[in-house]
Each structure stands twice: as structure tokens, then as C-alpha cells.
């Protein structure tokens, strides 16, 4: 699992966003800016949600036990889903509500340059947190296309940090533009519009994260190229006649479960045992000898079948390290 990289990204996000949150609320208290309050709420939601992500990472690292044979890896999806819902209601909902309220009851801003200074400081710090998260994704992707990996395979906690801090950086630019427009035009409505736009941005991020984590909780199949690779490995074994059924599930982004029902070729298995058959056949003189031969041959077939299954499983895990739970059965 990539728990180490995810923990680093989430811990950096919590620390950085906490200082940014304090600065933004202080700037709101000085300026009365709705966009600045929206940014403060946005960052408060980020801190809260990233704390939930950290809870999920820590709890998912617990070892398997009698309660959970496959471990608690998927628990991080539960907490990531709670985090995404929090972004939607706390970040998006409260921010849009405040923006609409400011639009209906506009008021002039004060000490605007304080807000500008805080936003510039916040942009630098949020940019650093975003850089840490992006670097984590790049290290985990191992050369895969960044955006495709982030969308399909990245750990949900890391993906959430990347998206939240990207939204934070964009939100800061929106807030800065809204405050500057309010200053230039003398119309505080721009500040309220900035607040609403920031809320909409948070809503879009939250909807994507909710969809991503709910899908993983339901239990998606492994990516199609990996599924095809598993099929190829099984079929390449000369003793395999047909793959009757193949089911896969992503337990977490670095752990797959693969179950396959395989029909083996009896003739191919018998061919492998032919030297032993000839030796044993020459020793048959009566029914008792034949009975011993049949019992021995049955044992040999079972052992050979088990060896073939073991060989296939080892090859799958050598090529696909994420396939930690394999269940191949002879049809």
C-alpha cells in the first residue's frame, strides 16, 4: 500500500491549511470581506476533511483479524466519503449561502490590503501543499499519465488532497479577483459573486470525490488492462483448457482480489505424468496392484493440479504485485 505517501500528503495539508485558515479568518475580521469569509470556511472545511482522511488512513492500516479476514483497507473509502460529503455541505453549502446573503445585503469592504496580503501568503502555502500532494501522486504512478492515474487509480486520500488544494489555489485567485474588482469599481457585489463561484467550485470537487469513493466502496473490478493480463497469464499455461469465469475486485488501490474458475486439460496433465504411468503399469500383476496404481495416480493428479495452480498464482503475483488475494479453482 501507499499509506506512507498518503500520510505525508495529508499531514502536510493539515498543517499548512491550519495556518492558512487562521490567517483568512483574521483577514475577514479586519476587512469584512464575504469572499475572504468564504475562503476561511473553505480552508476550515479542508482541515476538517483532511483530518477525517488521516483517520481513515490510520484505521485502514490495521492488520486482518477474525472480524475482517481481508483487513480494513477499504475503511479509508468510508472516511474519504464522509470527508467528501463534508466538503459538499460545509464547504459548498455554507459558502454559497453566505455569498447569496452578501449579494442581497452588500456592504463596503474595509482594510482590503490586509485581505490581499493574506491571500498572497495563503496562495504560497497552499501551492506548497499542492506540490507535496502532486509529488506523492507522481511517485506512486510510476510513469503512468498523471491525470488518468489520479482519476482512476490514485489513493482516494491523496486524490482528495490534490483536488482540495488545487481548488484552494483557484479559490484564492477568485477571491483576490473579486476583492480587487470590488476595490476598483466600488461595488461590493463582486465580492459576493466571488464567494458564490468559490462555493460552486467546492461543490464540483465534492461531487467527484463522492462518486469516486462510493464506487470504490461498492467494489469495482480491476482496470481492464490488468484483467486482460490475468487472463493471458492463466491461458498461457499448457494445462489450461479454458477460463470458465473470472471475477476481480479492488479492495484498495494497491490490493486486488482475483477469483477464477479454470478448466484444466486432463490429457495435458496425463502427458506430464506419462513417465510415472509407464513405470507403475509394468508393476501391475493383479487387481490389488491395479487398485494401488489407481490410488497413486489419483494422488498424483491432485498434486499436479495443485502445483499448476500454484505456478499460475505465483506468475500472476510476480507480474501484478497488487494481486494479493488469489483464488483459482479447478472447474
Image (cartoon, rainbow, N blue to C red):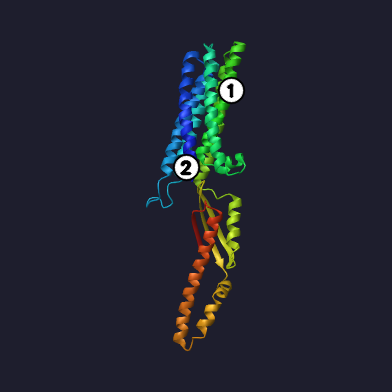
Question: Is 60 situated above or below 285?
Answer: above
- The correct choice, above or below, for 65 with respect to 117 in the image is below
**Which x, y percent locates residue 99?**
53, 20
Q: Residue at x 56, y 29 (%)?
A: 167
Disc 2, SS: helix
Res 3 label: 2
Among the two numbered marks 1 and 2 on one chain, the one whose residue lies closer to the N terminus: 2
Q: Residue at x 54, y 82 (%)?
A: 278
The residue lying at 49 percent from left, 31 percent from top is: 87
Up/down of 280 relative to 169, above or below? below
**Where does label 1 land, which residue?**
174
Q: Which of the labelled discs sits on residue 150, or is there none? A: none
Disc 1 packing (10 Å; few <14; some 14–19; many ≥20): many
Q: Is residue 226 or residue 144 the one in the foreground?
A: 144
Tell me where residue 22 sits by quadrant.
top left
- Report crowding for label 2: few under 14, some 14 to 19, many 20 or more residues within 10 A (C-alpha): some
Amino acid at each position: 500500500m501507499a499509506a506512507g505517501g498518503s500520510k505525508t500528503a495529508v499531514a502536510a495539508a493539515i498543517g499548512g491549511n491550519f495556518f492558512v485558515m487562521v490567517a483568512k479568518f483574521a483577514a475577514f475580521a479586519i476587512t469584512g470581506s464575504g469572499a475572504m469569509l468564504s475562503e476561511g470556511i473553505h480552508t476550515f472545511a479542508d482541515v476538517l476533511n483532511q483530518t477525517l482522511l488521516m483517520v481513515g488512513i490510520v484505521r485502514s492500516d490495521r492488520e486482518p483479524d477474525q472480524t475482517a479476514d481481508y483487513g480494513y483497507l477499504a475503511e479509508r473509502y468510508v472516511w474519504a466519503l464522509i470527508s467528501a460529503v463534508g466538503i459538499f455541505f460545509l464547504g459548498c453549502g455554507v459558502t454559497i449561502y453566505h455569498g447569496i446573503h452578501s449579494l442581497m445585503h452588500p456592504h463596503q469592504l474595509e482594510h482590503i490590503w490586509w485581505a490581499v496580503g493574506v491571500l498572497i501568503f495563503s496562495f504560497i502555502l497552499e501551492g506548497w501543499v499542492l506540490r507535496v500532494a502532486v509529488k506523492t501522486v507522481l511517485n506512486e504512478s510510476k510513469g503512468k499519465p498523471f491525470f488518468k492515474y489520479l482519476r482512476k487509480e490514485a489513493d482516494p486520500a491523496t486524490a482528495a488532497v490534490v483536488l482540495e488544494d488545487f481548488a484552494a489555489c483557484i479559490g484564492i485567485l477568485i477571491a483576490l479577483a473579486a476583492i480587487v474588482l470590488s476595490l476598483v469599481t466600488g461595488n461590493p457585489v463582486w465580492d459576493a459573486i466571488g464567494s458564490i463561484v468559490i462555493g460552486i467550485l467546492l461543490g464540483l470537487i465534492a461531487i467527484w470525490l463522492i462518486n469516486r469513493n462510493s464506487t470504490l466502496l461498492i467494489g469495482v473490478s480491476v482496470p481492464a488492462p490488468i484483467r486482460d493480463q490475468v487472463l493471458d497469464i492463466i491461458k498461457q499455461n499448457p494445462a489450461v483448457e479454458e477460463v470458465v469465469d473470472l471475477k476481480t475486485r479492488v479492495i484498495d488501490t494497491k490490493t486486488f482480489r482475483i477469483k477464477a474458475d479454470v478448466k484444466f486439460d486432463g490429457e495435458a496433465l496425463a502427458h506430464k505424468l506419462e513417465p510415472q504411468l509407464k513405470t507403475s503399469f509394468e508393476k501391475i500383476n493383479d487387481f490389488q496392484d491395479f487398485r494401488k496404481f489407481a490410488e497413486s495416480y489419483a494422488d498424483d493428479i491432485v498434486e499436479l493440479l495443485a502445483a499448476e495452480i500454484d505456478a499460475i498464482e505465483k506468475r500472476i503475483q510476480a507480474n501484478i504485485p497488487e494481486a494479493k488475494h488469489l483464488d483459482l479453482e479447478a472447474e
